[in-house]
Amino acid sequence: MERLSGLLSWTLSRVLWLSGLSERGAARQSQIMEEKALEVYDLIRNIRDPEKPNTLEELEVVTESCVEVQEINEDDYLVIIRFTPTVPHCSLATLIGLCLRVKLQRCLPFKHKLEIYISEGTHSTEEDINKQINDKERVAAAMENPNLREIVEQCVLEPD
């Protein structure tokens, strides 16, 4: 009986020790996701608005809280951006989404899947725009248009 009690005590202490490791691992994982989200935000904050002389950060189209990063597996991440157009009928919301996508596809230093959405309830045609900016074929077709490509290039150009 004493031996069983000792074994039970050892097992319990081991479980408690391992659960502490698990909690520390989860906290570390959360910290890594936050760091990656900040890395993403740093890339998109200086994208210029297509019609104003301001950045998306200055216009509060993007904020730190609009970026979420989730781990898909050890080397792959899901990056979710939820941006807020300046007005509910913004005619350039699709172009802003395209700029976000182009900038991140070019500059993110880690493997990722990218989802870009308009923040819920902030645009009159958000569903249609969300479909457009997350459709690879539509994005590719848009970037084949020389006029559109030039606007995107000007918007994503790094400030000096």
Image (spheres, rainbow, N blue to C red):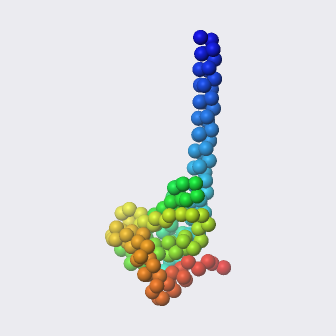
Q: Does residue 136 sit above or below 146 in this rendering?
A: above
Q: Is residue 44 left or right of residue 132?
A: right
Task: Tell me the quadrant of the picture where the C terminus can be found.
Answer: bottom right
In the displayed orientation, state which residue is furthest to the bottom. 146
Q: Is residue 153 visible?
A: yes
Q: Is residue 88 visible?
A: no
Q: Measured from the top left, where is residue 80 in percent x and y?
A: 48, 62
In the displayed orientation, state which residue is furthest to the right. 160
Q: Does residue 75 sit above or below 135 in this rendering?
A: above
Question: Closer to the camera, 135 or 152?
Answer: 135
Q: Measured from the top left, where is residue 52 in percent x and y?
A: 50, 80
Q: Does residue 126 sit above or below 146 in this rendering?
A: above
In which quadrant of the rendered view does residue 33 lie? bottom right
User: What residue is rendered at 36% in x and 63% in y?
Assistant: 121
Q: Measured from the top left, where is residue 73 in percent x and y?
A: 54, 54
User: What residue is rendered at 38% in x and 62% in y?
Assistant: 120
Task: Tell me the quadrant of the picture where the N terminus can be found.
Answer: top right
Q: Does residue 153 sit above or below 46 in this rendering?
A: below
Q: Is residue 10 left or right of residue 145?
A: right
Question: Closer to the camera, 3 or 156?
Answer: 3
In which quadrant of the rendered view does residue 75 lie? bottom right
User: What residue is rendered at 49% in x and 65% in y?
Assistant: 114
Q: For the image shown, how many numbered marks are present on the structure?
A: 0
User: What residue is rendered at 59% in x and 25% in y?
Assistant: 12
